[in-house]
Amino acid sequence: MGSVDGDFEGLQAADRRAEVIEWLNALLPEYCLPLDSSDDELRELLSDGTVLCHIVNALIPGVLEESWGAYASSDQHAGHVKKFLAVVADMGLPGFSVKDLEEGSMSGVVDCLLVLRESVSSGLRDGTSKAPLRKKWRVPETGEPLVPGVAQGKTSPGEDKRNGLPDPKSQQKTPIFNGRKLREIFQLKRGSYADLPAAKISEMMHSNSLDNAPTQSLLSVVNGILDESIERKKGEIPHRVVYLLRKVVQEIERRLCIQAEHIRSQNVIIKTREDKYHSKIKALEILVNGTNEENQMAINRLQIIKEEKSKIEEKRKLGEQDVARLMKEKEISENTIASLKKEMEVMTSMHEQQLQKIELTAKQMEEHLTTKIKEVESLLVQSNKKIEEVEVASLLKSQLWNKKEGIFQKYMNSQQLYVKGLRISSWSIKNEMHALEMELRDEMSNFGSGLKCLVDAAENYHKVLAENQKLFNEVQELKGNIRVYCRVRPFLPGQDKKSTTVDYIGENGELLISNPFKQGKDGHRMFKFNKVFSPFSSQAEVFSDIQPLIRSVLDGFNVCIFAYGQTGSGKTYTMSGPSTSKQDWGVNYRALNDLFDISLSRRNAFSYEVGVQMVEIYNEQANRAVGSTALNERSSRILTVHVRGLDVKNGSTSRGCLHLIDLAGSERVERSEATGDRLKEAQHINKSLSALGDVIFALAQKNAHVPYRNSKLTQVLQSSLGGQAKTLMFVQINPDVESYSETISTLKFAERVSGVELGAARSNKEGKDIKELLEQVASLKDTIVRKDTEIEQLQLMKDKVKSPSFAVNINGASMPKNSNSDLRSVLSITTNQQSQLSDPQSYAEVNRDGGPTSYTDITPTCLDEADFEDNASEDGFSGGTDYSVGCAAGASENFITNSSIQSHKEWTTSNIQTKTKGYCSEDSKSNESSIEPIDRRLFTEGI
Ligand SMILES: Nc1ncnc2c1ncn2[C@@H]1O[C@H](COP(=O)(O)OP(=O)(O)OP(=O)(O)O)[C@@H](O)[C@H]1O
């Protein structure tokens, strides 16, 4: 069924297509198409829209502008189709989709055309035409909406009077007539025709109103008039209305005639066309019946043509693209040409300007050159004149030179003769020189042998010198000279190393100091000491030089080493040194270390006991408070090392004492800038130092009296300076220029010290016999002490009865007036040293030899502190004020001997001082056997 229906529908479609093709062939014979043409063939005919536009124009001539052409573009093709569709739509007929025409089924297109045909034929039948058909259509431009081409109110095309359709020719001929007006004229209300004014009717008749009015309007006018006349019955129709009616009817008749005529002519056309079609059908039938080969060939040809067509179209497209490209290039090159032209114009103008400038400059140059040429010409004239003058002058000069040449030639000849003579004499001198040289060589060889002898002699000289030095030292040792070692402190960081006062340091203790304020010979001063250590000498070097001295303590010698010098000159550095590193250790540490080492190494032969004591003397008292002055921060410090040795084999003993003293700064009071308590302190420090100076001075002068008791310091050093001790002084100096005056005074003082002879040192060694005797003495003393205590107790008992009186204060103890008790008191003091020795300050008051320094504490009335003046001279010590008038001087040398005990028995309260003095002068240097017991106590109890 489906296929039957499909076949049926296919047959219907083919019939309908054939119907349309037939209609088209009749309407447009030039496009004659076989009736059995396929959809594609029909599509091919209609697809560009041209035929469709022809159809519309054939049906409604002039409705479309004839702007379509054979070579229209695809857009234009679409435009033609759309235009057709617009006309159809305007007629109220169904259209078709543009796509239907391009592909797919053509039924929609066929239907549209059939409806159009039907509509047109019905329009022709009833003599009317749809309003839109009167509009004129044109192909819209690209992008323009599809609207009627004639603006509203502007179109008033005349109708085709032959078929009632608008007459295209009348469109150009008749004036534009307003459609609204026509309606106003011809669409009157019922009953109003009779009332129409004559003017209006004449307007309707005289104008082209009737020609332009549609037939329907005319008929309505007729009907209106007739209806009006029927309603009025007896009423009369005005003549003018009758006249209008006649005119309208005439017009209608005329139109009908025209239409009839048109239909007749159409029929004739159709008939002729029908004949044509019939003949064509026949021809086609013949063709259909023709050979298949021809068909095939035709199809092939069609195919080829199609391909060619597509190629041509492609070529055309390419050509169009080329044209577009070329157009663009043309545009670009035109632009370039334009810009180049502009540039050229600019360049030309610039060039012209430059040319003008150059011309101007050239003109100026020309003028300038012309003037120059003129100047040069004048100069040339002048120079020509000058040349002439110079030529004359040079001629004269050349004549003069010729003369001079002659003279010079003569002089040269004489000089050559003279040179010849000189050469001869030089030859003779050379010969003489040669002879002299030979002589000199001989002399030199003689001199060499002589020099060798001298070198040998020099070597011997050095040996002799060393021997001399050794001998000198031995002599010094025998003499007991105080050895003086000078040490120059290095510059501290931040000090100017160039401004030094030390000019030269000799190997044999020479020291040359330069005065920065004086030049020449006076600006230098030479000193000579036992040794001078340079700033580069190490602590170890310094110690190695004094080591034998220190070791002699173990052999029973008393040794005293003290450092003297201004503040900051390195005294503490030399004596103590920084304890942080072993290599910087000073003399104190090294000495103790060395003593312990040796005592250990000798332990099989000797038994040593070593004791150490440290004392600081401050303001001449047992304690101090710490303050500071501009320079002095401390007074003197004394480290004492006591060594007692016992020979294990023979039982002999030795006692040595080593004083290591770091003195206070040696500068003068004014320089310390101290006031108040500090001034007092500085004065005390000065006092002890000046007292030291006094002692040294007295010793150097070999005075009978040496003022040891003027200060605690000299008292402590008494045994070292006055006894048979070995004494060494380190004189420390600061090389800084600012310390020049202090350096000089220090060195002068040291010079004096080096001149002091103390006598040969003696060792404190005792044999066994002496020891036993001493022990006996000690036991006797103990017995005496016991007896004394008993006596004292008896005395006290006696005193209760009779009140006693005291005149002298001995070390805080009262001394009774009774002469019998004197001895007891003195002995009591002597033996009671035990209790005092536990106090270091008390120790400072006890001399090495066991002398009870409590004697020294018998304060001499003459030693008023106020009497102490700072007499420090340039030499750094007191100029020799003798304070020794009192008992102090005598007491300073006391030794506790049996005989002295006897002497003390003679003391009375009135003559203590003189008696003591007398005793000292007589006995001070004798009876050393009595030293031992006291010293032993010192050793065992004091340390
Ligand atoms: N030989 C030296 N090598 C290196 N530095 C030294 C030497 N001698 C002294 N000094 C340094 O110089 C400074 C002053 O030295 P020191 O304190 O020993 O002087 P002083 O004479 O003891 O002074 P004062 O009288 O005030 O005690 C210290 O900083 C010390 O380390």
Image (cartoon, helix red, strand yellow):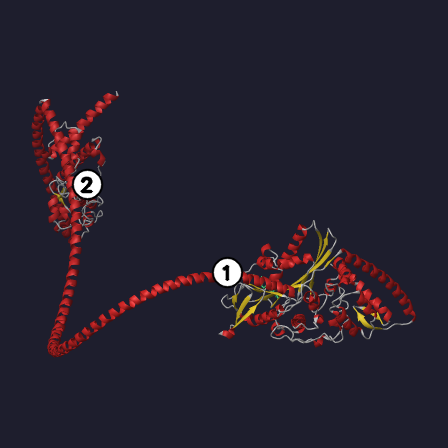
Between marks 1 and 2, how big is the CA–CA gap?
A: 137 Å
> Picture quarter containing residue 793?
bottom right
**Percent position (x, y) of residue 809?**
80, 71
Q: Which residue is the site of mark 1?
A: 459
Please identify, in this view, whether the residue under mark 1 or under mark 2 is nearer the observer.
1
In the image: residue 866, left or right of residue 198: right
Question: Where is residue 195 drawn, in percent x and y?
Answer: 19, 51
| Disc 1 crowd, CA 10 A, few/some/many (<14, 14-19, 20+) | few
Q: Type of residue at label 1?
A: Glu
Q: Is residue 9 above or below residue 904?
A: above
Mark 2 crowd level (few <14, some 14–19, many ≥20, 10 Å Cα): few
Residue 522 in picture, x, y percent from top left: 51, 75
Q: Give the x, y percent position of residue 502.
A: 52, 67
Secondary structure of the residue carrying numbered label 2? helix
Q: Is mark 1 on a helix, strand or loop?
A: helix
Residue under the point 26% across and 67% down:
427
The residue tagged 2 is 75
Vertical side of 402 occupied by 452: above or below: above
